[in-house]
Image (cartoon, rainbow, N blue to C red):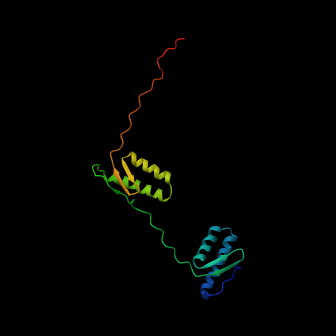
Amino acid sequence: HGYTRVDDGSIVLSPADQATLDGMLLERLLAKRAREFAKADELRQKLRSAGVIIDDGANTYRVVPPEPPKPPQPARPTHHGYTRVDDGSIVLSPADQATLDGMLLERLLAKRAREFAKADELRQKLRSAGVIIDDGANTYRVVPPEPPKPPQPARPTHHGYTRVD
């Protein structure tokens, strides 16, 4: 494979581990020559996770302690965290409550992702449906939705005056 080990040798490899390492380095080299870069990158990542750092420019490698496993990513929230604080006079069906909960959660996720335009759009949709949100207190109230505005009367197109000179 042509690679030379350049670390201090403090991590000792068994003959079997050294043979596996040499095989992976050779396989990676052949993958690069065949222009199978995805396979070469996959092998590089496997070597890296096993504690082998490759320097292709110098054709060298170092053996370091393997990386500890990364902590799991925080789970995506499944609840919005808002509490209803109105008198409950407006009863929502289970389907409507599920839709409301979904929209509140979607808004929360949009805010966390700093997608404020989307969060504002959802807030406006909720407001037009009669849901008032208080972000400071993490509460919401359900009020009767705003009635549609009556159409404006048509404006006259002619004033009815006659010019007399």
> Residue most toward the top?
165
In the picture, measured across the screen, residue 70 lies left or right of residue 29, that is left
Q: Position of residue 70 (x, y in %)?
A: 51, 73
Is the residue 102 above or below the residue 41 in the image? above
Can you say whether 152 is above or below 37 in the image?
above
**Quick one: 110 or 7, which is closer to the camera?**
110
Residue 115, percent from left and from top: 50, 55
**Which residue is depicted at the point 49% across and 53% down?**
116
Pick the front one: 14 or 5: 5
Q: Which residue is situated farthest in the front direction here? A: 165
Q: Within the image, what quadrant is residue 43 found in? A: bottom right
Asked whether, in this view, residue 125 is left or right of residue 164, the answer is left
Give the tally of numbered discs.
0
For the N terminus, give its image quadrant.
bottom right
Q: Residue at x 62, y 85 (%)?
A: 18
Residue 17 is situated, as x and y percent measured from the top left of the image, at 60, 85
The spot of residue 31 in percent (x, y) is 66, 71
Image quarter in which the C terminus is found: top right
Q: Which image quarter: residue 82?
A: bottom left
Q: Residue at x 39, y 36 (%)?
A: 149
- Seen from the viewer's position, the closer of residues 165 and 15 is 165
Q: Quadrant of residue 12?
A: bottom right
Q: Residue at x 48, y 71 (%)?
A: 72
